[in-house]
Each structure stands twice: as structure tokens, then as C-alpha cells.
Amino acid sequence: MKIYLFLIFLTTLLFSKEADIDELLSQYRAASELYFETKNEEAGHIIVFSRADLDKMQAYTLNDVLKTLRMFTLKTTNFGMSSLVKTPYSEQSMSSVKIFINSYELTSVTSGTSMAQFGKMGLNHIDHIEVYQASNSITFSGEPGNMIIKLYTKDSSRERAFVSQLSLDSEGGSRAQIIEADTFNGYSCLANIDIGKNEYKKYKNNQSTLSRDGYRGQFYFNLSKKEDFMLEAGSSSEKYDLFSGIGSSIEDGEVDVKYHYIQFTKYLDTSLKFIFSSTYETLEIENSDTTGISLFDETIANDFIMRAGSYTNSAILEKRHKYKNNNLLFGAQVKFKRFFLDELKSNSTEKPIILGPKKLDIYMAYFEDIYSINKNHKITLGLKFDHYDSHFGTSSTQETFRLGYIGRLSENFSLKSFVQKGYIYPIFAQTTFSPIYNPNPYLKSSKTAIAKVELEYKKESVTITAGAGGSKSKNGIIYDASEKIYINNDKNSDYKHFFINSSYKFNADNKIIFEYFKAYKDNFYFSSDEGVLLQIYNRVNKFDIYNELVYRSSYIGVDGVHIDAGYDYTAGIIYHYSKKLDLKIKGENIFDKAIQNSISGIKVPALEKRAIFTMEYIF
């Protein structure tokens, strides 16, 4: 009996010590998260998805993260691609969202937004994600964007492992990913391969079957030496069914997209760096429609083929300098974009077309000063000048001005605010070529003025953040359906919003987040104007448990179809069988009530109801 009691005592002691050790390890991992090294509080209102968050969320694709972002709604397009629509605008507004992998900007000339191609991008090689809303395009260089999404890859020196992951889902889809990270002789290397088969529910529209099934493969590689250089290369290829296509009664259709890039960063010293990148992409669309496709010139095509692509080359030189209380940034960038149209056929016959500008050269110079009044208060001043030359008889110089303040008001309260005057430049799909509407080569940039403020209260485990803002747009770019062309709006547009976000952190592995937002616009609403996010992260012994609810309000789309409010409930469990093996199960849109949008009169969610089973093994 004494031996039995001793064994019980010993077992209890060991388990309690193991629990204490696990808690200490969790605290250490939380304190050493990479985002502490990369996030830029002065650059905008920031949302961070840490390594631990992404793991517990089982965020396999970028769409898994995008659907949770406040002020936006994730939707599906007629082509079966992803679209991130700003509240409460329509899909035709083409929100200016920029996506970066480290310092490389994922840019798409053919589709106008990288969202279309990278929503299904695998995240196995990504360490954490930072989202900057009403972002500072000066700090991040490049063309302006209303929101910037920064994806930071895993650190090879921390990983040093070969990891494989295999997923199967209830719709018949599958995914295989491998990642290898290692260091040798002062160098770090990271490689990732991701191959997936995507299967979705089929829809019936008259005599047509709508499908967006397809295959996607991606590759990422980087080689670096600390404080010396980083070489990055990426490639993706995706082929999938065209869904409803360009017409109203699709018979057959396919999209084939390929994207390749390389970027080299050289650190000339601790404060000076040079970045060169080159991008090549192709887009092929084939569409057969029984009732015919109405093209840009009012002709009807039962069979349509388009093959297009682009080249983009960019070079950046940036210098940082500290002088007394000033943290200065000086930068210059040149970017050369080239669009090409290899084939355009209607009913098996080459179709003549007059293209808009096929070239666009951009010359950018920017400056930023972060002035520290004292350790608790900072003022940010930024200026940027961009010169556009389209080689089409049109050129313009655009300016961006930003003034911001970030400060700690007391032990528990901090404030962040800024005003920004800038612009949004039209994309190639609006000025150069589109199969379904006329290009407008003389389209002007839209002028914007933004003001935002964010107040944060933080005490022990509680954080409450409230924010509000407004913007005015002049010369806005809108679609004129009667003329089938994008034009500049002669009226001003006003937009306002507010949000509140609260979180309670029980410990390093257990927390709850609640968020609500509401947006206001001065005219028609074509998407949800309010939303709610609830996230619950838990760890119980060897189990990680995640619950998520995304709500979007009802709306009436541009086609006049009423869309009911949507509730997307997603949940997942991870069983850490051993230090090397994880077993995972995730349910997406479990009650099949997620927000939808209307495509050819059919209501379709961006992410459908499905169960995903995953096994991950570390070699």
C-alpha cells in the first residue's frame, strides 16, 4: 500500500512538473516570437497573427487569415478566384491591397491585384503575418495601398528541420507540403514545396454546371547570410475550372496561371541596403458559353481564348540614419512594368484590338522621419513623390504626405493617430486591356485623404482597443456599366468606420479575442457594413483547441440579389502525439452559414463547409 501511495505521489509530482515546464516553454516561445523583431507600430493600425496563432488556427492558406480581417469581406469571383472586398463597397471597386513576402511585393499586372492569385497560397513556410490597415506606403515602398499584408518566412536558424504535412478533406481535396530549413558555414537556407488538389461543391445554373475545382503548386526558396545578403525565389502554377466564366451559361472553361519571381537583397552596411526583383507571370483563359459572351466591342463569342502576361522589374535603394532624436529613412525605387497579349480569339478567329499603354515606368523617392519627443511620445512625418510614365502620351507625378503620432498617455493608455493625403493609381485591367470592357488609357489617379485614431487600454491580461477613421476620395475610379468602361467619378466619396477589439490572455496558450466593426458610406452599400470576430485559443494537456466565429451583415449586391447575414463557425483540434508527430482535424464553415455573394444568381460562399484531416511529421 505504501509503495502504491508513493507511486501516485511520484506520478502526480512528475506530471505537475511537466505541466510547469510546458507552461515555461510556452511563455518562452511567446516572448521570442519573431514578430517582435519585425512589426512597425508607426506604419499603421496593425493586426498580428503570430506563429502560435497560425498553428492553432490551422491556417493552411492565406484565405484562412483574410476572412477574419475587419473592414473586409472575402468573396468568390465569376472566375473562381478570391476577392477581398472592402466594406461596404462592391467587387468592382478593386480594393488596393498589397501583399509582401518579406520585402518582396507580390504584384500582378494581368489581374490587377495579387489577391486573385495568392488567396490559396500555402502558409507552411510562413512564420507570422502582419496586417497594416490604412497603411504607410512610405515605409514599405512601392505603389500605394490601403492595406498592406506582410508575410514573414520562417527563420532557418530556429527551425533546422525537415517537416512534411499531408491533408485530406471531406470534399475530395488534398494537400502535401514539405519544408526544409538548415544552416551551414554562416549561411541559412529555407525551401518549401506545396502541391494541392482543390475540390468544391458544384452548382447548377440553367443547363450549366459551375465548378472551380483545380490544382495548385508552389515553390519557395531563400538563401541568406546575416547582415550580408538574402536571395529569394518563388514560383506558383494553378489550373482550375472557370466557374461561371465571362458569360451567363458556361459550357466549359479553364484558367491557367503561372507566376515566377526572384529577389536579391544586399546589405551594403548596417543601415544601407539594395534590393532587386524580377517577376514574370502568364494568364490563360478559355471559355465556351452556350448563349454567348458579350465582349468589350459588343460582339458575341461562344468560344473565347485569351493568353496574356507581364514582366516587372524593380530596384530599391534605402538608407536609414539616426541623428539625435530622429530616426530617418531615405529611399528611391524604380519599377518597370510590361504587359503583353499573345492571343485573343473569338469563335476560333483572331480578334483585333487596340490596347492601351503596355508599358509603365514608375520612379519613386521617399523620406520619413520618426522623431522621439521622449521615450513615450513619437511623431512621424513622411513624404513620397512618384512619377508615372506610360509611354502613351500620358505621364503624371503623384504625392503622398503622412503625419502621425504614437504615444503612451499613461501606464495603461496609449494613442495612435495619423492623417495621410495620397492617391490610388489605375491598374492595367482598367487602362490597357480587359476582354469584357473597354480600356481607358486616360484614366486619372484617385485622390484620397485619410484620418484615423486608435486608443488602447492595457492592464495585465486585458487589452481593449477602439479605433475610428474617415476618408474622402476625389476623382474616384468607378465602373460605368452603360459604356462598359472605367471612368473618374466627378463626385466626392466619403467613408467612415469604427471598431472595438478586446482580448483576454489567460496565459501563453489560452486567450479569447472579440471584435466588432461598423462602416458608413455616403451612397449605395454593395457588401456587408458590419462584422464580428470571435476567436478562442486553448491548450489542454496535449491538445490545442481553436474556435472561430466570423459574422458579416446582410446586403444587396450590385445585381440586386439580397444576401442574408452570414455566420462562419470554424473549429479545430490538434493532438500533439509526440514531439515529432501532430494529428489535426479542422471543420470550416461547419454550419454552412458563411456570408455569400451572388454569381449568375447563385449564392456562393468563399470558403465552403468541409472537414480537413492533417498529419504533420518532423524528421
Image: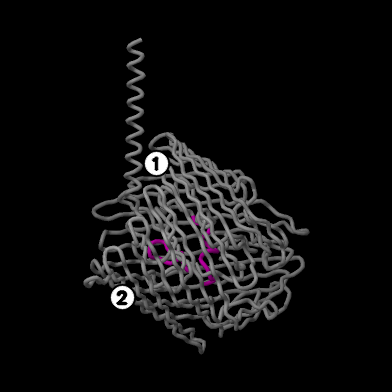
Q: Please give the residue where the numbered disc 2 appears in the rendered image.
A: 330
Q: Is residue 106 magenta?
A: yes
Image-quadrant location for residue 492: bottom right
Q: Please give the residue where the numbered disc 1 appears in the rendered image.
A: 618
Q: Is residue 598 magenta?
A: no
| Front residue (pair 424, 44) | 44
Residue at figure coordinates x 58%, y 52% from the top left: 198
- The secondary structure type at the circle numbered 1 is strand
Image quarter in which the N terminus is found: top left
Q: Amino acid at mark 1?
A: Ile
| Front residue (pair 127, 234) | 127
Q: Residue furthest top?
A: 1
Question: Which span is picked out in magenta?
Answer: 98-121
User: Is residue 108 visible in this depiction of the protein?
Assistant: no
Could you say where residue 277 lies in the image, as x and y percent from the top left?
39, 69
Local packing at callout 1 (Cα closer than 10 Å; few below 14, some 14-19, many 20+) is some
Local packing at callout 2 (Cα closer than 10 Å; few below 14, some 14-19, many 20+) is some
| Residue 80 as seen in the image, left or right of residue 184 | right
